[in-house]
């Protein structure tokens, strides 16, 4: 203990080992330092603030009770693991979080041995943790696996699949439920209400523990009475509180416990650890704890850009964005057409649907973090004559692929998917880049896919998809605002063909078309003219687009898409033997960093496009 000169200094400790040497007061000082570090860093780099401020004491207690990396921590989503990073030897690098070549905003096993499992999507932790705990059991490893998840995860179906298998697994599995009444938007549904009612059990558990402590100290009759109470407690509990769902599934249940009281947390976590069987620990926390603006508006401070610490005001208010335009256009259409419904999976604000919710709440449905259910729910709405529009991030749409295929496409019912954050999204990294929706959506028979390049096209495509087209339609659009060059371009819901007297043709869709026009201007200054083609209804591929491509010996195709299954791959196959296609796409998972930098590194900035074309044409 004497070896620690500054016991509660985040930057002068051997972490996480030295945490066990601190007393409770020193832990509180450390918690305060961690909060200052979180606020300072996120105010500059952006990131997930409210969720991390709410789990500071919990994370300290976890590392004092368990022994990482021998004990494995699995964080659900992972956006609440910043304190975990600070306490596992990454404090000196923490200022680089979410920047290129810096720390990831989510757990990554290749970043630290203390990160047991990568995560970025919700409701996966129990399944992953059970797999790890089972592997440890098979290898006679006596250590524990700990899954830490927010109550918002209980709006996603995979959690229940995991719990159903985990409760009677006989593994050293501890599941910590961090209850704060929030996921990203406020939690909805029966599961959220159920977890809320468990808070009322706190008095019962405290009274039970106090009575047992007294009986343990009572001579002669104490132990027999305690034994009798043990046999009758299940019946008594059923009468007063009924059994919890978790106990019915085979878990021990501990809590609720104050998630900001380190001593209480350690007591309950130690009890859970000592049971050596699947155990649920319920922890009550306040999202945004310790920073008043985040406590007052936890939804707004879930994921933020840079902001001013003193006021909590973000540097940039994202009202000028594709998401906002989408949400407002959908509301305008819904005023005129009473069949239009809006559906979201816990992303009301992120997808711009807050306007719809406020104006037409009866036709607005937030289903929680349940993208699979959302897609089939839309199929049900559509089968009885409604026009559902499901707004969802590209990365989360991956989770509902089977439902899109089986429940929507086969029936031929009419529904619209608003694919938000299509393409590179930047600092959130591999788990969130929207670069796979085209490869998997284009495998669905009879689907129509639009990729507008500016706001006007987005509005036109949404209107056509919802009110004119039939069957399953997707309208995909990027994060952020339209570019000036894309805005000033000709609009269409089919395609735009710009003939400039060029010997080569360059193709781009979505926001990249603005960069392609800029690349064309750069080349023109060098005396090189190129023709441009902007597909807007990108799938199915129009015969006219292939006919245009076949006019040229050389075609350049640029897209924010994984190369296998990309539109460029399809174009090349359809023009084989007539045209040489030079394709620039993405070759795999894309790391975190600023979107503009990542696009440039991928050869998709205006300058890199111009270089690619000029180099191939020997200019």
Image (spheres, rainbow, N blue to C red):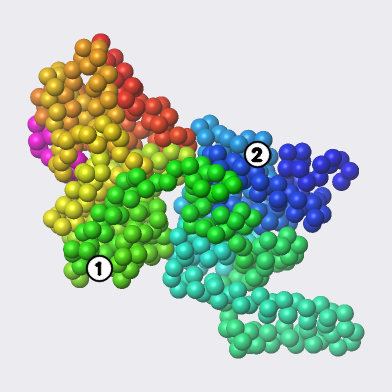
Asked if residue 543 is among those painted magenta in the image, a careful observer would answer yes
- Front residue of 451/296: it is 296
Residue 84 visible, this orientation: no
Residue 456 visible, this orientation: yes
Asked if residue 56 is among those painted magenta in the image, a careful observer would answer no
Q: Residue at x 60, y 36 (%)?
A: 95
Where residue 81 sits: x, y (%)?
Answer: 59, 49
- Front residue of 111/528: it is 528
Q: Residue at x 40, y 53 (%)?
A: 350
Where residue 198 sits: x, y (%)?
Answer: 58, 75
Whichever of labels 2 and 1 marks the residue nearer the N terminus, that label is 2
Q: Residues within 10 Å of mark 1 (few under 14, many from 20)?
A: some
How far, Cα to Cα, is label 2 from label 1? 48 Å
The residue that disc 2 covers is: 90
The residue that disc 1 covers is: 381
Where residue 504 sits: x, y (%)?
Answer: 17, 20
**Is 260 placed left or right of 220 in the picture?**
left
Q: Secondary structure at mark 1?
A: helix
Start and end of the magenta stretch?
536-547
């Amino acid at each position: 203990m004497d070896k620690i000169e500054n016991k509660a200094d985040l930057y002068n400790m051997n972490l996480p080992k030295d945490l066990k040497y601190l007393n409770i007061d020193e832990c509180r000082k450390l918690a305060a330092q961690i909060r200052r570090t979180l606020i300072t860093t996120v105010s500059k780099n952006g990131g997930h603030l409210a969720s991390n401020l709410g789990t500071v004491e919990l994370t300290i207690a976890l590392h004092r009770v368990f022994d990482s990396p021998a004990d494995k921590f699995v964080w659900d989503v992972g956006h609440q693991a910043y304190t975990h990073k600070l306490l596992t030897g990454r404090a000196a690098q923490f200022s680089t979080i979410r920047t290129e070549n810096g720390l990831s905003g989510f757990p990554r096993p290749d970043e630290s041995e203390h990160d047991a499992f990568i995560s970025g999507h919700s409701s996966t932790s129990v399944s992953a943790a059970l797999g790890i705990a089972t592997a440890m059991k098979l290898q006679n490893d006596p250590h524990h696996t700990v899954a830490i998840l927010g109550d918002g995860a209980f709006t996603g179906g995979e959690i229940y699949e995991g719990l159903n298998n985990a409760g009677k697994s006989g593994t050293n599995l501890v599941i910590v439920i961090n209850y704060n009444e929030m996921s990203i938007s406020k939690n909805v549904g029966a599961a959220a209400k159920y977890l809320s009612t468990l808070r009322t059990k706190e008095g019962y558990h405290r009274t039970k523990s106090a009575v047992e402590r007294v009986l343990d100290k009572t001579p002669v009759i104490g132990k027999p009475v305690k034994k009798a109470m043990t046999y009758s407690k299940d019946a008594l509990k059923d009468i007063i509180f009924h059994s919890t769902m978790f106990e019915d599934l085979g878990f021990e249940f501990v809590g609720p416990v104050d998630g900001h009281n380190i001593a209480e947390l350690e007591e309950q976590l130690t009890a859970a650890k000592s049971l050596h069987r699947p155990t649920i620990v319920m922890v009550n926390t306040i999202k945004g704890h310790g920073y008043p603006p985040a406590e007052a508006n936890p939804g707004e401070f879930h994921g933020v850009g840079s902001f001013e610490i003193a006021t909590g005001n973000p540097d940039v208010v994202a009202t000028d964005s594709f998401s906002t335009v989408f949400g407002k256009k959908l509301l305008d259409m819904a005023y005129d057409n009473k069949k239009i419904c809006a559906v979201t999976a816990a992303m009301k604000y992120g997808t711009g649907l807050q306007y719809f919710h406020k104006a037409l709440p009866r036709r607005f449905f937030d289903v929680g973090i349940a993208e699979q259910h959302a897609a089939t729910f839309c199929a049900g709405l559509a089968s009885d004559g409604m026009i559902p529009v499901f707004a969802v991030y590209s990365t989360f749409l991956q989770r509902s692929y089977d439902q899109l295929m089986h429940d929507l496409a086969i029936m031929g019912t009419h529904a619209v998917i608003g694919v938000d954050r299509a393409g590179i999204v930047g600092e959130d990294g591999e788990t969130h880049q929207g670069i796979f929706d085209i490869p998997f959506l284009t495998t669905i028979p009879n689907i129509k896919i639009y990729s507008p390049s500016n706001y006007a096209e987005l509005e036109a495509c949404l209107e056509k998809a919802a009110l004119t087209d039939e069957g399953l339609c997707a309208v995909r659009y990027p994060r952020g605002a339209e570019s000036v060059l894309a805005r000033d371009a000709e609009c269409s819901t089919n395609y735009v063909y710009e003939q400039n007297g060029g010997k080569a043709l360059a193709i781009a869709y979505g926001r990249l078309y603005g960069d392609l026009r800029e690349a064309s201007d750069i080349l023109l200054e060098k005396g090189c003219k190129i023709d441009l083609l902007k597909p807007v209804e990108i799938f199915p591929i129009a015969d006219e687009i292939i006919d245009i491509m076949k006019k040229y010996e050389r075609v350049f195709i640029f897209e924010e898409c994984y190369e296998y299954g990309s539109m460029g791959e399809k174009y090349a196959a359809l023009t084989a033997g007539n045209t040489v296609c030079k394709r620039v796409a993405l070759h795999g998972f894309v790391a975190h960093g600023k979107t503009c930098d990542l696009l440039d590194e991928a050869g998709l900035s205006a300058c890199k496009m111009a270089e690619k074309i000029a180099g191939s044409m020997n200019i």
